[in-house]
């Protein structure tokens, strides 16, 4: 048994010797048992360890799975012996690692967990649960995968198996993040980081802190997230490039929220530089998102030309990966930045761009093969594009009107776009905040143009569809706006904007 155990530690450094020695140990153990010099427990343990060592060489014999299956069947005839159950767990684990068949792997890991339960071996249940959770997670059933990790943690109890505990908590954190449970993500990631630190698992500890920091960002606790994310970044190896870029994205956003936009830009640019050296990352949605965020921060710092260049790249990247939502948002941002840089000279390109964005979103909404979530996202972006198109059109028409100012009949293109925006925001589950904003802007515009009756009519129409209890706050806003109009007030009005 001792010799077989030592082989495991030499498997990677001397694979050929280990393969030969494993076969010799298995044969010797069988001979010694036949001579009654060792018992069945020692025999079976030696055989399982030898098979494990053979697997770890990276080039096991083709019949290893068949031999493991045969030994498992032999041990299955000893259900009253706990050692046999535990050795069966090892064999089922080995066979699961040997197969590439997804269904077979899931079956073997489930069987391993069942045998571990029968052996009342908490650590073995935990080990099987960790591997099974990974397998179930690959199917997209994150709720079930999380339930499996919970069972593993319960089975582990207070056993000092920090490596398994760290893996289970790390998996649980990943699965809760996928389900949008950010407090749960944080708690499991924190527990994982404690276990990782206790046994010096640096990279898994960094992964745990990444999840902790991301969860804190999602919970709007950015001040707490920053030092945790910075620590994670320091400990990640080069192989974790995507995770490093995601951390830098979160840090860029967090530093900006803390009024340190310059440092945020530095993280954004560092992430972009890394992704541009990794072709596979340059085609990921994160690349387009990071370009957009970095462009926004550069614009905020007044570095308009650099921001414009980044926005242009962001729009191209989003279009390349087929992320229409991101493409629409960054394309609109680019229109407004051009307006800032070029003034009235940007109207022509800007108005054409808004129409082009709307056309793309209309096509996406009409695509029957697009997932419902994608079509719903396109609905929001289409309504928002119409709304911003109305703003830009108002500015253009106002610039053309000269000293007399814009007349009511001349503003019809703006009002038409606002009506389109409102119709889209109401075409499905009500997008309350955007729909309300659009109507308020219509009311402000009509009031500025002297059409108070039209403004009142728009407000009263809104009250007609804001009837649910959850619309109470929005209703109050319109009631107050109508009262201001009827009283002759127009405070806070901002034209088409």
Image (spheres, helix red, strand yellow):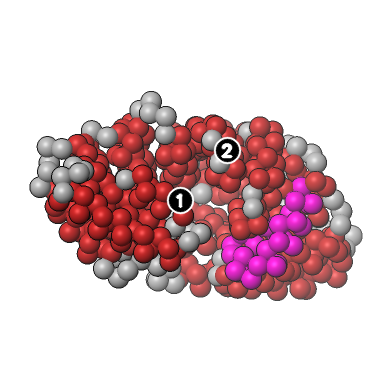
Residue 280 inside the magenta-drawn segment:
yes
Q: Which mark is residue 417?
A: none
Residue at disc 2, secondary structure: loop
Q: Is residue 258 above or below residue 261?
A: above
Q: In this view, does 299 lie above or below 99?
A: above
Mark-to-mark CA distance, 1 and 2:
19 Å
The residue that label 2 is drawn on is: 200
Looking at the picture, how far across and down is residue 202, in whole percent?
59, 42
Boundaries of the magenta span: 264-291
- Any part of residue 63 in sight: yes
Sequence order check: which comes first, mark 1 or mark 2? 1
Locate the N terminus by quadrant. top left
Q: In this view, does 228 lie above or below 287?
A: above
Residue at disc 1, secondary structure: helix
Residue at 80%, 61% (x, y): give it.
307
On the picture, is 284 further left or further right than 269? left
Residue 336 inside the magenta-drawn segment:
no
Residue at 12%, 43% (x, y): give it.
78
On the picture, is 478 further left or further right than 390? left
Looking at the picture, how far across and down is residue 300, in whole percent?
81, 50
Instruction: Name the one closer to the observer, 368 or 275.
Output: 275
The quadrant in which residue 52 appears is bottom left
On the picture, is 416 further left or further right than 423? right
Badge 2, how many Cα within 10 Å: few under 14, some, many 20+?
few
Looking at the picture, how far across and down is residue 56, in whole percent?
41, 58
Q: Label 2 near label 1: C-beta < 8 Å?
A: no
The residue that label 1 is drawn on is: 9
């Amino acid at each position: 048994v001792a010799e077989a155990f030592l082989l495991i530690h030499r498997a990677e450094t001397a694979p050929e010797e280990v393969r030969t020695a494993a076969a010799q140990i298995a044969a010797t153990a069988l001979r010694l048992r036949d001579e009654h010099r060792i018992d069945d427990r020692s025999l079976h343990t030696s055989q399982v360890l030898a098979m494990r060592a053979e697997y770890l060489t990276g080039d096991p014999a083709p019949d290893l799975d068949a031999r493991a299956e045969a030994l498992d069947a032999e041990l299955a005839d000893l259900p009253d012996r706990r050692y046999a159950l535990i050795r069966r767990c090892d064999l089922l684990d080995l066979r699961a690692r040997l197969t590439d068949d997804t269904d077979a792997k899931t079956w073997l890991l489930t069987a391993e967990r069942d045998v571990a339960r029968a052996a009342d071996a908490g650590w073995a249940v935990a080990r099987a649960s960790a591997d099974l959770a990974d397998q179930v997670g690959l199917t997209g059933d994150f709720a079930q995968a999380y339930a499996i990790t919970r069972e593993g943690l319960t089975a582990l109890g207070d056993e000092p198996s920090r490596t398994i505990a760290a893996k289970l908590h790390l998996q649980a954190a990943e699965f809760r993040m996928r389900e949008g449970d950010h407090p749960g993500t944080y708690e499991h990631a924190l527990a994982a980081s404690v276990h990782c630190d206790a046994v010096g698992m640096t990279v898994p500890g960094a992964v745990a802190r990444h999840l902790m920091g991301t969860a804190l960002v999602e919970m709007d606790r950015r001040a707490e997230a920053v030092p945790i994310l910075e620590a994670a970044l320091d400990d990640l190896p080069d192989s974790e490039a995507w995770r490093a870029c995601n951390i830098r994205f979160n840090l860029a956003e967090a530093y900006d929220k803390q009024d340190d936009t310059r440092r945020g830009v530095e993280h954004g640019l560092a992430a972009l530089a890394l992704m541009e050296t990794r072709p596979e990352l340059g085609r990921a949605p994160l690349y387009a998102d990071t370009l957009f965020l970095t462009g926004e921060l550069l614009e905020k710092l007044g570095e308009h030309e650099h921001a414009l260049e980044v926005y242009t790249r962001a729009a191209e990247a989003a279009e390349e990966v087929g992320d229409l939502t991101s493409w629409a948002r960054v394309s609109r941002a680019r229109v407004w930045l051009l307006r800032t840089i070029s003034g009235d000279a940007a109207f022509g390109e800007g108005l054409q761009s808004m129409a082009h964005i709307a056309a793309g979103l209309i096509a996406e909404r009409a695509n029957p093969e697009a997932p419902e979530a994608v079509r719903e996202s396109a609905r929001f972006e289409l309504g928002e594009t119409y709304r911003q198109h109305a703003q830009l059109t108002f500015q253009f028409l106002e610039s053309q009107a000269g000293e007399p100012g814009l007349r009511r009949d001349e503003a019809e293109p703006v009002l038409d776009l606002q009506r389109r925006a409102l119709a889209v925001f109401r075409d499905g589950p009500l997008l309350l905040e955007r729909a309300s904003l659009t109507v308020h802007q219509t009311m402000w515009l009509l009031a500025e143009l002297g059409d108070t009756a039209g403004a009142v009519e728009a407000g009263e129409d809104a009250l007609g569809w804001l009837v649910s209890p959850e619309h109470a706050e929005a209703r109050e806003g319109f009631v107050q706006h109508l009262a201001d109009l009827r009283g002759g007030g127009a405070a806070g009005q901002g034209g088409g904007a």
